[in-house]
Image (cartoon, helix red, strand yellow):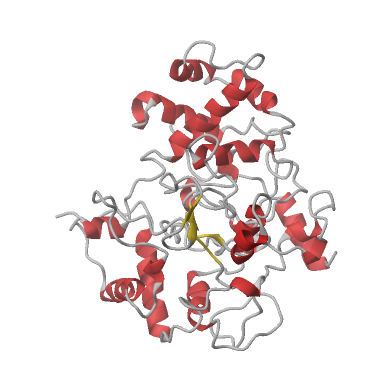
Amino acid sequence: MSSRRILFLALIIATPLVIIGTHTTSADNSGLTAEEQLGKFLFFDTNLSTPAGVSCASCHGPAVGFTGPVSKINVTTVVYPGAVHTRFGNRKPPSAAYAGDSPTLHYDGDDGVWVGGMFWDGRATGATLGDPLAEQAEGPFLNPLEQDNPHAKQVCLAVRHASYAPLFEQVWGPGSLDCVKDVNGTYERIARSISAYEKSSEVNPFTSKFDYYLNGQAELSEQEQEGLALFTGEKAKCSGCHIADAGPSGEPPLFTDFTYDNLGVPKNPANPFYTMPRKWNPLGAKWIDLGLGGFLSQNYPPEVYESELGRVKVPTLRNVDLRPRPGFAKAYAHNGYFKSLKAIVHFYNTRDVLPTCGGSFNHPGEDCWPAAEYPATVNHDELGDLGLTPEEEDAIVAFLKTLSDGYVPPSN
């Protein structure tokens, strides 16, 4: 293992998985329903891992838009350690916000695309529970690289001994927290409660500057307006996947279409999954993230999954720049290869223009990009050679910064 990798791991193992922000413990004052409040307790409970110490919020912090809340990790490995701090998964934590409208994973024959599901690869399809968010919530608890519980009963028992256990039976009824005769049913209710919180107005407040602009309560700067025009126009083509239009009943835009795409993102050489034991990563440094296609290959023939290899879910751009302080680092793309909005916008703009090169992280202004991790399915139609000027790139970045929740509009 390189000295650089050892330093990364040492930094992260020494970094507590702190939760940025606070949460209300009173259902009366929170503005949440009882089920949403229960889900919130579960979401922030650090006793639901083995060993204790890792909650959902450990990887999905509210102060950063419910994604990775530790700046030091975002700038190094990007992938977060699990309850056993020497174990790592293989991708950046996706945002848990603005995801509740993701449908059950299905193939849209009209557009020729897969839509819906949760996780970067869509494996929480929603087919079992009818709710991809709830199915996603079931996953990390039992993942040995994340919360590391050996079985659902252990999660159930931890909830049974929690201070909010009475609220559980208030929400789901007497006997609903049964860790002996109905473990599976109780585990499902735990997941559905977390899903309810993740769909709540606390997680999806729609309080960005752009929302106030849409409501006529704020004005965009000239640069932000230029960025919006580029974002929704034919030159930058961003809104082709990151839908900026209102919903069918006037709902605010979610800035995703819940589809899957291969942007041509290079491998992230700092990903600690490459050095995980063979029981979890038998390919070692040769591992390639096959995304949706890798998941589909478990149940479908090659003519279905091969065209989806390397494609990952299109994330919402809401809160893409939300951070607790100016110097806080965020990472972008499914593997966190990019460390700034400017860098990933520059990549969208110049990926197919600049020559391919070796090396690790690129930054705006460099004259080459490393090769795509999975080249065969890279999208060359909607990005890679956009012809944006540096000023236009900056304008798009300025617009993206208007999508952070918590904006306070000027008083009249």
Q: Residue 189: in sight, yes or no?
A: yes
The residue most toward the left is 412
Q: Residue 72: in sight, yes or no?
A: no
Q: Left of 244 or right of it: where is 139?
A: right
- Camera-side residue of 287 and 207: 287
**Residue 22 to residue 223: above or below:** above
The residue most toward the top is 174
**Residue 12 to residue 2: above or below:** above
- Camera-side residue of 228 and 292: 292
Instruction: Locate residue 4, reporting x and y percent.
Output: 78, 67
Q: In the image, what residue occupies the spot 43% across and 26% down?
A: 35
- Camera-side residue of 135 and 107: 107
Q: In the image, what residue occupies the spot 65% across and 85% down?
A: 356
Instruction: Locate residue 165, reporting x and y percent.
Output: 54, 18
Using the rendered view, name the quadrant where residue 186 is placed. Answer: top right
Instruction: Locate residue 363, reporting x and y percent.
Output: 58, 78
Using the rendered view, name the quadrant where residue 27 is placed. Answer: top left
Q: Left of 282 or right of it: where is 83?
A: left
Q: Left of 2 or right of it: where is 269?
A: left
Tell me the quadrant of the picture where the N terminus can be found: bottom right
Q: In the image, what residue occupies the spot 59% across and 47% down?
A: 59
Total residue callouts: 0
Tell me the quadrant of the picture where the C terminus can be found: bottom left
Q: In the image, what residue occupies the spot 59% across and 26% down?
A: 187
**Residue 205 to residue 28: above or below:** below
Instruction: Locate residue 260, reporting x and y percent.
Output: 52, 61
